[in-house]
Image: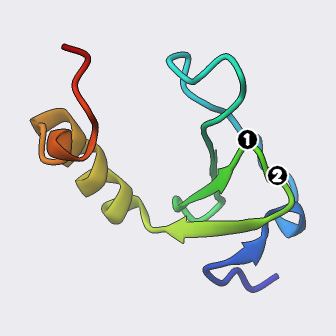
């Protein structure tokens, strides 16, 4: 199957969706699934059959490193 960005998440076969242990207990979070080519699919947990965004391994590595480095901290309100 050809996988394009925005594919209906339910069309991704043989993937295991998972979310962070830090996710909201009400289920308002994103879920990720590893793909056979090393890429990662991302979907909204509130709409599991909705579109999945597809990222390459390099794109995800850059995003995760940016998050660790605090590059996106200004996008989230602080608690105090």
Q: Position of residue 45 (x, y in %)?
A: 72, 43
Which residue is at 65% across, 35% downward? 28
User: What's the CA distance linking mark 1 and mark 2?
Assistant: 10 Å
Up the image or down, 34 lies above or below 55; here it is above
Q: Position of residue 8 (x, y in %)?
A: 81, 72
Crowd around label 1: few <14 · some 14–19 · many ≥20 (10 Å): some
Asked if residue 65 lies left or right of residue 37, the reply is left
Residue 27 shown left or right of residue 59 in the figure: right
In this rendered view, identify the residue nearer to me: 40 or 52: 52
9 shown above or below 30: below
Asked if the residue at tag 2 contacts the one at tag 1, i.e. Cβ–Cβ closer than 8 Å, the answer is: yes
Q: If you read the primary sequence from the N terminus, does the residue marked by circle 1 or circle 2 appear first? A: 1
Furthest toward the front, the residue is 80
Question: Which residue is labeled 2 in the image?
Answer: 48
| Element carrying mark 2 | loop
Residue nearest the viewer, comparing 78 with 48: 78
Judge by depth and name the residue closer to the eye, 1 or 18: 18
Q: Nearer the viewer, residue 57 or 79?
A: 79
Quadrant location of the N terminus in the rendered image: bottom right
Between tags 1 and 2, which lies in front? 2
- Residue that mark 1 sits on: 17
Q: How many marks?
A: 2
Residue at position x 86%, y 60% in the image: 49
Residue count near mark 2 (Cα–Cα under 10 Å), binned few <14, some 14–19, many ≥20: some
The quadrant in which the C terminus is found is: top left
Q: Quadrant of residue 57?
A: bottom left
Numbered badge on residue 75 = none
> For the residue labelled by badge 1, is the local secondary structure a helix, a strand or a loop?
loop
Q: Is residue 74 left or right of residue 54?
A: left
**Position in image of residue 10 (x %, y %):** 89, 62
Q: Quadrant of residue 65?
A: top left
């Amino acid at each position: 199957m050809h996988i394009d960005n925005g594919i209906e998440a339910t069309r991704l076969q043989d993937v295991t969706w998972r979310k962070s242990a830090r996710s909201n207990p009400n289920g308002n979070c994103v879920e990720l699934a590893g793909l056979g080519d090393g890429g990662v699919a991302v979907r909204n947990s509130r709409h599991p059959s909705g579109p999945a965004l597809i990222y390459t391994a390099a794109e995800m590595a850059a995003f995760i490193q940016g998050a660790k480095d605090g590059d996106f901290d200004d996008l989230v309100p602080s608690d105090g």
